[in-house]
Image (cartoon, rainbow, N blue to C red):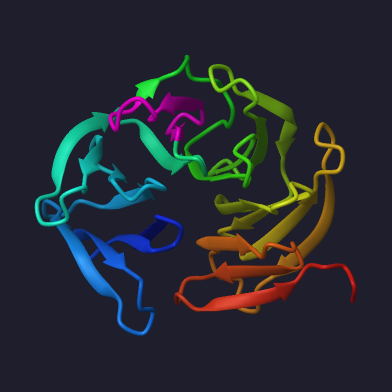
């Protein structure tokens, strides 16, 4: 399994896989430069990884153990500075780097303050959401809306205006027969996208966030698991990543 996360305005990329967490400097895209390597214990599998927007902190959520917080300010000497509960399922930094969203294995959501310190501090109690492991999480560009996906095949929209108490907007969205392993929100927050293990990509219209409607249902040719999603800034193009690591582009502009 390989997980990845961008930071420092896309200048850095953290990748977990093959027994290590590595951070790459992408200043020259034709010649990526590895700047940090942190070896993992044998058999460790990273479920989710998050690189802070300022490029100073990496959080890795493991399948078998606690989630670890690493300070990589000194690229030559990265160090472990903290941990999150063993029940952590998925993690994501807010775009401004002030808050960390953590999805639990029981499907609940909790927000952490990471502005005052690199070590996450819970802002409030966990809020119930999905019925089983939260497997994917993504912020809107302004950090005020969040979308999460779960192995229970549901997608949930969250209002984060009060980070101490995130509010679930409407009922869980269900239109897929497999777990939701990738999610995204368009820049204008008009649509949310969910990619599933059943090979489908569902686009939800969020004009009425309390009652999202199904806008598009796309199916990959091989019905492969969707592991990654990204929506273009104008919302008209969707990129998906499947089992073989290749990317597919979809027209979601609605213009034919």
Q: Quadrant of the C terminus?
A: bottom right
Q: In the rendered image, is residue 62 in sight?
A: no
Q: Is residue 25 left or right of residue 72?
A: right
Q: Please identify the residue farthest to the right as the structure is shown.
A: 255
When the figure is inspected, residue 47 is found, relative to residue 18, above or below; the finding is: above
At which x and y percent is residue 210?
82, 31
At which x and y percent is residue 165?
58, 17
Is 21 covered by the magenta stretch?
no
State the residue at coordinates (37%, 47%). Answer: 54
At which x and y percent is residue 82?
21, 31
The residue nearer to you, when weighing 176 against 170, is 170
Q: Name the image quarter holding residue 199.
A: bottom right
When the figure is inspected, residue 49 is found, relative to residue 162, above or below; the finding is: below
The residue nearer to you, when weighing 13 against 66, is 13
At which x and y percent is residue 68?
24, 38
Q: Is residue 9 left or right of residue 85?
A: right
When the figure is inspected, residue 66 is found, relative to residue 55, above or below; the finding is: above
Q: In the rendered image, is residue 247 in sight?
A: yes
The residue nearer to you, when weighing 99 against 173, is 99
Q: Quadrant of the N terminus?
A: bottom left
Magenta segment range? 98-120
Q: Please identify the residue farthest to the top as the structure is shown.
A: 125
The residue nearer to you, when weighing 117 against 199, is 117
State the residue at coordinates (74%, 63%). Answer: 234
State the residue at coordinates (81%, 61%). Answer: 216
Count of labels in the image: 0
Q: Is residue 32 left or right of residue 139?
A: left
When the figure is inspected, residue 229 is found, relative to residue 82, above or below; the finding is: below
């Amino acid at each position: 399994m390989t997980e990845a996360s961008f930071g420092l305005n896309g200048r850095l990329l953290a990748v977990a896989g093959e027994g290590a967490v590595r951070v790459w400097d992408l200043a020259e895209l034709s010649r990526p430069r590895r700047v940090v390597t942190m070896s993992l214990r044998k058999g460790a599998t990273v479920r989710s990884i998050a690189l802070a927007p300022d490029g100073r902190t990496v959080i890795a959520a493991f399948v078998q153990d606690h989630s670890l917080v690493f300070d990589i300010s000194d690229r030559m000497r990265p160090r472990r500075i903290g941990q999150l509960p063993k029940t952590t399922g998925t993690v994501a930094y807010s775009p401004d780097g002030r808050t960390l969203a953590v999805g639990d294995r029981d499907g609940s959501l909790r927000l952490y303050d990471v502005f005052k310190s690199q070590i996450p501090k819970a802002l409030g109690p966990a809020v119930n959401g999905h019925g089983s492991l939260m497997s994917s999480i993504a912020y809107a560009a302004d950090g005020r809306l969040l979308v999460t996906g779960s192995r229970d095949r549901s997608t949930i929209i969250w209002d984060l205006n009060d980070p101490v108490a995130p509010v679930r907007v409407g009922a869980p969205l269900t239109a897929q027969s497999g777990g939701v392993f990738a999610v995204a929100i368009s820049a204008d927050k008009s649509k949310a996208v969910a990619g599933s293990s059943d090979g489908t990509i569902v686009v939800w219209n969020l004009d009425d966030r309390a009652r999202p409607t199904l806008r598009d249902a796309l199916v990959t040719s091989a019905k492969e698991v969707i592991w990654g999603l990204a929506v273009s800034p104008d919302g008209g193009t969707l990129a998906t990543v499947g089992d073989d690591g290749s990317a597919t582009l979809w027209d979601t502009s609605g213009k034919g």
